[in-house]
Image (cartoon, rainbow, N blue to C red):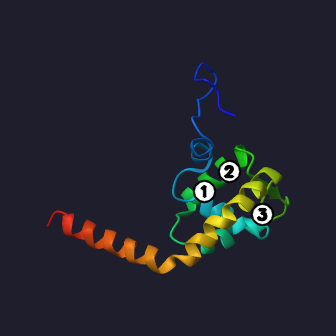
Amino acid sequence: MTNNGNNPLGPAFRCGMEAVLDLVGGKWKLLILYHLCGERRRFSELRRLVGSVSEKMLSQQLKELTADGLVRRIDFKTVPPHVEYEPTAFGRDLCDSMQPVCEWGARNIGEIARIAEARAIHRQADAPQ
């Protein structure tokens, strides 16, 4: 449900997509959540799976996902530290809704790769020499 914009406590979302993007917008959050959907993972596993994300950015994104109630941080209180992350019920619900988008991406991966390549060439051509 959206509010009418008169809520002094928070943003007025005009549609559900706007609300979702407010929650998980940016480059890394959906990918992090995607890799947590199947199983509980340690920080180092996530870092390898997500790819080029920095340790600092991954840590920040996990803190935000945890604060927003999408991810649960499990601290085993051991030395050396052992911490794992898993989606909450709220996060698993989002994971389930992401599945059709993942399937669309898999079906169209060749076209998407072609578009990404064309963008990279365009950016390189526009870069100052």
Decide if residue 43 is in sight here.
Answer: no
On screen, residue 15 above or below 60: above
Q: Which residue is mark 1?
A: 29
Task: Tell me how far mark 3 sits from mark 1, CA to CA.
Answer: 16 Å
Q: Give, as a three-letter code, the residue at label 1.
A: Lys
Circle 3 packing at 10 Å, graded few (<14), some (14-19), many (20+), is some
Residue toward you, 36 or 97: 97
Q: Which residue is mark 2?
A: 65
Farthest residue to the bottom: give it: 110
Between label 3 and label 1, give the one nearer the viewer: 1
- The first of marks 1 and 2 along the sequence is 1
Task: Tell me how far mark 2 sits from mark 3, CA to CA.
Answer: 13 Å
Provide the secondary structure element on which disc 1 rests. Answer: helix
Q: Give, as a three-letter code, the residue at label 2.
A: Leu
Provide the secondary structure element on which disc 3 rests. Answer: strand
Provide the secondary structure element on which disc 2 rests. Answer: helix
- Quadrant in the picture for the N terminus: top right
Q: Which residue is mark 3?
A: 84
Residue toward you, 52 or 109: 109
